[in-house]
Amino acid sequence: MPLYARLTFWFVILLASSIAVLVSIMLDGMADTVSHAEERELRGYLGAVEAMAGLRTNTALALAEMVAAMPDVRMDIAAADRERLLMSFSEPFAKLNGDAGVQQFQFHLAPAISLLRLHQPALFGDDLSSFRQMVVETNLRGTTVQGLENGVAGLGARAIAPIRQDGRVLGSVEFGMDFGQAFAEQFKARFAADIAIHLPDGDGFRTVATTSRFLLSDPLVTRAAFSGETVLRRYHANGRPVAALQAAINDYSGKPVAVVEIAMDAGDYAAQYAQARWRALVVGICVLLGGMIIAWFVSRTISRPLAAMTEAMHRLAEGDLDVDVPAAEREDEIGRMARAMFVFKQNRLEIERQKAVRDQFSRLGILGEMASNIAHELNQPLASILNYARGMVRLLDGEAADPAMLRTGALAAAEQAERAAAIIHRIRGFVRRRTPHRIRLNINDLVEESVLLFEASTVRSKVAIHTALAPRVPLVLADKVEIQQVLLNLLQNALDATPDGGDIRLSTEADEGRATVSVSDSGTGFAPGVEDRMFDPFFTTKSEGLGLGLSICRTIVESHGGGFTVQSKADGGVTIGFTLPVLS
Amino acid sequence: MDEKPLVLVIDDDDAMRGSVAFFMASVGLDTRLFKSAEEFLLVLDDLSKERPGCLLLDVRMPGMSGLELQRHLNEMSFVLPVLMVSGHGDIPMAVAALKGGAEDFIEKPYRDQHLLDAVNLAIRKSRERLAEGSERSVVRERFQRLTRREREVLAGVLAGKQNKMIALDLDLSVKTVEVHRHTGMEKMAAGSVAELSRMILLADIPMSSS
């Protein structure tokens, strides 16, 4: 796997796991917050239920105390006069029952005998002591008692006040406010939360009031709630999320008397949670995508210059010194690496340059030294000869030329001339030409062989060599090495004259007893004055040339009985050809 | 004084020395030949200091080169003019030779007339230098014979002072100064103060008036 892909991959993995951890922690916290908010709200509703019940018992207490304090009531109770009480209170009760939610209005005789139920006048005289502890307590102690209690008419928010005469408790009066369906509905109207009230009934529970048929009452939960736990539940009802709470509610004595179930629509909370989850998801994906792009980009900025540098390094290793070193302008580690590579390249360039200079100097140096030595060697005898000759002339011009002295001078001059000749002989010994060795040659074969030899040097300048050979050429008698020298020399001159990408044409012809070999370049032709002198020894247009090439060529060709032809071409190039006599 | 000039030739090449000697002889000039700069230096002290002539010096020699010898001769105030000869003289070498006081730089092979002109010119210069040199020694010799007082008085005269001032400076009477001045001028064979001044300048004698 390439470096940039690996970097990107691990960066994305890291990013994704960070996002996953962060989002899950955030969502957990969110869920906690939502659940706390729901619980607080539900507990608030429970408090409201208790407060509403308290308000009702307070109203009942006020009514009971007022009735208990009425002298007529005392008299009637003392007399146990049901009819008078019924007559006095049936009309007020009807009013209270309608407007103030008073459900029960009852007089008792001590200790707990029902004297009159205004809400149920037909039923009286029954003993309540077995199940109405509030009544028993009021009559026993002579104090008011208030709170929730079950009675014949069901659960109520009740208050009982004693009726005294001469310090003796004659009986009591009781008001009971509704704590059932009407209460539930009033609660719902007030708080927009559903409520149900469950009473224990044998082994199970009986629902005495409910505002919603969707309220679930699980008997196990209700039992747990009745034993003092506050149970919170969440579920869906009618397609909506619901949060519900069940808790026991106590009677006047602090003992659990019923279970209140409160359920509220948790849609808002659920919607908030869902929205938060969505948002986290979207943000997470965006961050991940952004992270991937950044990781890709960063990885590429690291890997791309590395790749480019590797490529450049390869090319440097292959000897291509024209290659540019990438990323050298960067300030970072990659830039440092690039600069190190740049130094490496510069060193290579410097080495190459020095080598080129050295080669050139050694070539020129040897020739220069040789020329200088030859010049000095020959100068000495020449200068001596001149001195003798001039001296003799002056002697002869003078009045008395001494023959003996003239002889000395002439001998010395001759001696020096011999010395010069000896020097030249020695030099020629160095550069003595090999003895010519002439054989029968097919000039076409020679041309093809020379082109093969020469092509190595044309590759770099991308100059093409085209050959056009005459189909049949007669044989010539020639020294193969010498003629090849001539041909290679002409080809080299043509290559020097031809710009990169140009071409050189080589052709052979045979006519009238002569074979001709021609070389055409595609250069710019002769500079003025060059054509007349091009075969002169030591004439050259090249900065490093000795100017002997064409001179030697001409010597060779003429020694074979041939000659040179030179033509300027219309397109600017030059055609140089030489002819050799064919064998008859 | 009017001796026959002598051309001193220093060249490592035997043929060159011989041919130069022959050529000089053809025009009536005497030569003395030396194989190397070292050989020349060995006999330098024995050479006549009075004889006019010049030095033909080859630049390129094994051992001490022509340029080195020239430098050496300059240090010891060699009086004869030096002509540098080179088989392959180049411009830097010519410049060095001329800067070092060479009379001329001649490149081999040379035209005979060119060489001859240069040699003759050098010989003429040598004669002038020798003449100057002999007058100088005469003046110096005369100066040696002056007494201390005479020198002091003449120094004052050359500084353009009146006899009175010289007397004051030297704590002498004017009369005494006049006597010293008269004998001093006579010993120096100077007809006037101007002539005395020229002599002193030529002989390069340091004079201070106090």
Image: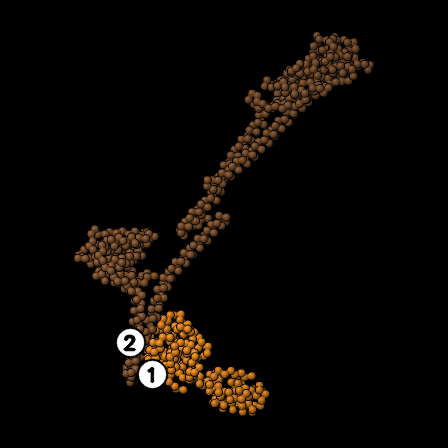
Rendered image quadrant of residue B168: bottom right
Relative image position of residue A99 (x, y in whole percent): 67, 16
The residue under the point 41% across, 76% down is: B37
Q: Is residue A296 above or below residue A426?
A: above
> Image check: A276 left or right of A120?
left
Type of amino acid at the residue the image marks with label 1:
Gly
Q: What colour has chain A?
A: brown
State the residue in front, A213 or B123: B123
In the drawing, what numbered circle is on residue B28?
A: 1
Q: Which mark is residue A317?
A: none
Q: Nearer the viewer, mark 1 or mark 2?
A: 2
Q: Position of residue B68 (x, y in %)?
A: 43, 74
Q: Is residue A99 visible?
A: no
Mark 1 touches mark 2? (CB < 8 Å): no
User: Relative to A277, is A178 above or below?
Assistant: above
Write down the quadrant of residue A579 in the picture.
bottom left
Image quadrant occupied by the C terminus of chain A: bottom left
Residue where numbered disc 2 is placed = A414
